[in-house]
Image: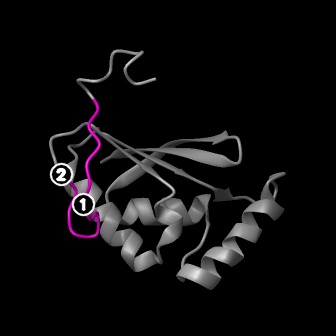
Amino acid sequence: MIEANGLNERIEVLSGSFLENVPSGYDTIVMKHIIHDWPDDECLSILKNCRESLQVGNKLFIVDAVVDKDSELFRRITTFDVLMMSFLNARERSRKEFETLLDQTGFKIINISQVGFEHLIEAVAI
């Protein structure tokens, strides 16, 4: 899909520890199934490192489940939430919890979309 859309020159996959730093010089960071794996203090470190690597107006995309008790996915997501707490001392988070983490680290949520079982959280560096 990347190659088919002519994006080879714009996308780079890097390895490393986002708990230590995130390489700068990019206009977007995508994290899939990352935030729900960590307790709040590590999430704050990860997100601060992401913010330090981005300029104002650059975007952060988070793909994770968002807990919403009014959603048809609520039971399924809360089942995963119990598993995350049991095995990783981590958890699924509500919209408000994502907003709090992102606000504390220099981001503002501009959109949340449901994509199948998961959500795409779009945030901008402020």
Label 1: how many Cα within 10 Å (few below 14, some 14–19, many 20+): few
- Kindly indicate the quadrant of the structure image that contains residue 86: bottom right
Sequence-wise, the earlier of marks 1 and 2 is 1
Q: Secondary structure at mark 1?
A: loop
User: Is residue 73 placed above or below 42 in the rendered structure?
Assistant: above
State the residue at coordinates (52%, 61%): 98
State the residue at coordinates (61%, 47%): 119
* Horizontal and vertical percent position of residue 115: 65, 39
Q: Please, what is the three-letter code of the amino acid marked with disc 1? A: Gly
Q: Nearer the viewer, residue 40 or 107?
A: 40
Give the label on residue 23, or none.
2
**Image check: 46 left or right of 77?**
left
**Image check: 54 left or right of 63?**
left
- Kindly indicate the quadrant of the structure image that contains residue 22: bottom left
Q: Nearer the viewer, residue 87 or 91?
A: 87
State the residue at coordinates (51%, 57%): 33
User: Is residue 75 placed above or below 25 in the rendered structure?
Assistant: below
Spatial CA distance of label 1 from label 2 is: 9 Å
Q: Are marks 1 and 2 in contact (CB under 8 Å)?
A: yes
**Image check: 13 left or right of 96?**
left
* Horizontal and vertical percent position of residue 55: 20, 43
Q: Please, what is the three-letter code of the amino acid marked with disc 2? A: Pro
Question: Can residue 18 be found in the magenta stretch?
Answer: yes
* Horizontal and vertical percent position of residue 54: 22, 47
Colouring scheme applied when the structure was drawn = one colour
Q: Secondary structure at mark 2?
A: loop
Q: How many numbered circles are shown?
A: 2
Question: Can residue 114 be found in the magenta stretch?
Answer: no
Give the label on residue 16, or none.
1
* Residues rendered magenta in the picture: 11-22
- Kindly indicate the quadrant of the structure image that contains residue 6: top left
Q: Nearer the viewer, residue 59 or 64?
A: 64
